[in-house]
Image (spheres, grey):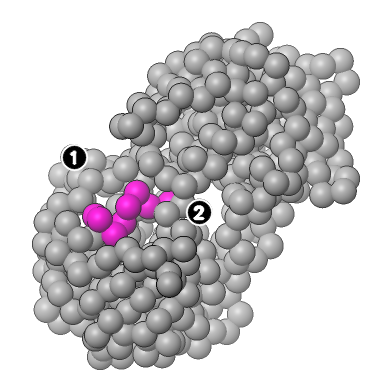
Amino acid sequence: MDYFKIQGGDPLQGTVRAAGAKNAVLPILAAALLTDGTLRIPNSPKLRDVRTLSTLLEAMGCRVQREDSGAIEITADGDILWEATWEQVRQMRASICVLGPLVGRFGRAKVSLPGGCVFGVRPIDMHLKGLAALGADMRIEAGFVEASVPGGRLRGGEVFLGTPAGPTVTGTMNVLMAATLAEGRSVIHGAACEPEVGDLVDCLVAMGAKIEGKGSPTLEIQGVEQLGGAEHHVIPDRIEAGTYLMAGAITGSRVRVEGCVPAHLWAPLDALQRAGYEFEIGTDWVEILPRRQRPLPVDVTTQPFPGFPTDLQAQMMALMSLADGTSVITDRIYPDRYMHLPELLRLGARIRRQGSTAIIEGVESLSGAPVTASDLRASAALVLAGLVARGSTSVHRVYHIDRGYERIDEALAGLGARIERLEEA
């Protein structure tokens, strides 16, 4: 098992390029199940989660071709299994994205309840509600979601997918994919507006789907008889881009992120600006400028897009641990997403939790120590803290970070960080 050894205290300098978005490419990979044509993704990121879902699709009967560049081609034209077992699904929550395409194309599915990062309960009741609104009989039996469609084809319907924490992103994607092959018109009210949902819409339209309302909370889908193959470039990863910008912020350095979409980053950029940082922004790049002073304290509440993303909450907490004052971070999307907190305490941070809120009393410096990553974004926060901590920090269980960042150690080393990937003894 690998770990990162980081020698903190060095400034960063240079340019890094954002890869394709993890949260966009995974449902798009699953969308290949909707057609017997070939779906090609030229800029698929080289991530552990991509390999995991590709392996699942292969086990279900799809032909998957991977290129050294990262490009992937998927063809689901053979005898496709409509079952995804616990052994196949347990590694990654996004595996539930195969549910909608299976029900939409084959009229039946048996998919194990998903695994993934363990930072609280994330129910899939909205997925079930949405598919039921399209005519599927849904039930949970022995740890599996089982679906069947009387007559074999879904029928158009209307459904509201809002929840107290906001619209469900993966639920929106699952119902959207299923509705593309339903008979008649479907409407999703309270749809998630995240850029990754819009990217899936673009891919499905390229495959022949008829969808209106991209980027809005109301999606209208006119079902078609069949979809075809397509080539689709996924959007840049806004969470990866935000993480690298925060790496520049926490080290007080000049870091440019290229190949990103600045419009997807307004909320984290606003938070960084309130913390005292300045930027230069181009059409497809953002550059954070050096700052010698400690960051100003900032209060942040995670919200659905275009609000501050929950996937940058841990990284922002690492930055605020060094602020000149007290900050308050509240996660309304996943109120239990604070497993990085005790590990930041090991590095010298002063943080206390009250329910879904963390109160961070900024300190002048952090000190290196061994820490353990518990999930994907917590891993990134610990790496950022290690970049600025005095002495040496070792971040263990970095297989979590490999799920969502394309060789983050090499990218940071290219910016001047002293970070190396080592093997546990």
Query: From the viewer's perspective, is 31 left or right of 144?
Result: left
Answer yes or no: do the residues labelled 2 and 1 have beta carbons within 8 Å? no
Would you name the residue on which mark 1 appears? 283
Q: Position of residue 237 (x, y in %)?
A: 36, 45
Image quarter (top left, top right, bottom left or bottom right) of the C terminus: bottom left
Q: What span is colored magenta in the figure?
A: 404-411
Disc 2 or 1, which lies upstream in sequence? 1
Q: Is residue 406 magenta?
A: yes
- Amino acid at dot 1: Thr
Q: Which mark is residue 304?
A: 2
Classify 281 as above or below 311: above
Q: Residues within 10 Å of mark 1 (few under 14, many from 20)?
A: few
- The residue nearer to you, when weighing 145 against 319, is 145
Residue 16 in magenta stretch: no
Name the foreground residue: 90 vs 187: 90
What type is the residue that disc 2 sits on?
Pro
